[in-house]
Amino acid sequence: MDKYIQQLIEDLAEIEANPIPEPDFGTSYEDFERVMLQLELAPRVPSEQLLNISYEQLPPAERLNKMQMQKLLIAIFNALLAKRISVSIPGKGVPVGLIYTEIRDMFKEGFPTMPGWVIDFCSGWCPDCAFTDYCDSCKESWSKEELEKERKRNSSKEP
């Protein structure tokens, strides 16, 4: 598995070595608004197109050890930075397996292409968030009791 992980890291390093240029925002505020609107409305790009790696190529967390996940995450984050996309982890002490699983899921969904985009994993709805136990913003907005109550309410609605 180490050899395979190393190959993925090398593939991601190629992406990192070829960063995209800063977009041309024009010379006026109107130009800037037009470009920003185009970027905001752009569809997500498949991971294969953006990073040359598909969801299926990334092993699930259960098949990797902590060090392999850490190395892969660093390579993924650096490749995304070369595409002008950064990642912000919501909270402190988040297990590497959780971070890896959540970023791997993004490979299934595709990535935004807007330069300057920050992937922060926050939808604004704490009861469904994988990072709830680590997120300071959640702790400021929800008590444990409120979270549990909302989670039970939502699970009773599911078929």
Image (cartoon, rainbow, N blue to C red):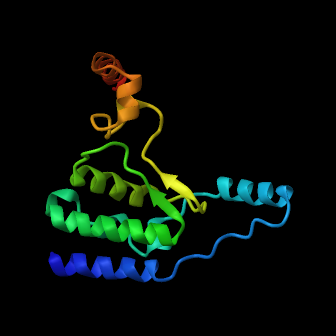
Q: Position of residue 5 (x, y in %)?
A: 23, 75
> Is 110 left or right of 5, judged from the image as shown?
right
- Image position of 103 with respect to 6: above or below: above
> Is 116 left or right of 119, judged from the image as shown?
right
- Image position of 31 with respect to 136: above or below: below
Q: Position of residue 141 (x, y in %)?
A: 41, 24
- Image position of 145 with respect to 83: above or below: above
Q: Is residue 110 visible?
A: no
Q: Quadrant of the image for the C terminus? A: top left
> Is 42 left or right of 47, judged from the image as shown?
right
Residue sitting at x 51%, y 82%: 18
Residue sitting at x 67%, y 59%: 39
Q: Position of residue 29 (x, y in %)?
A: 83, 56
Q: Is residue 33 visible?
A: yes
Q: Quadrant of the rendered structure where residue 142 is?
A: top left
Q: Quadrant of the rendered structure where residue 107 is?
A: bottom left
Residue sitting at x 29%, y 44%: 92
Q: Quadrant of the image for the N terminus? A: bottom left
> Is 132 left or right of 34, judged from the image as shown?
left
150 and 82: which is toward the camera: 82
Residue sitting at x 23%, y 54%: 96
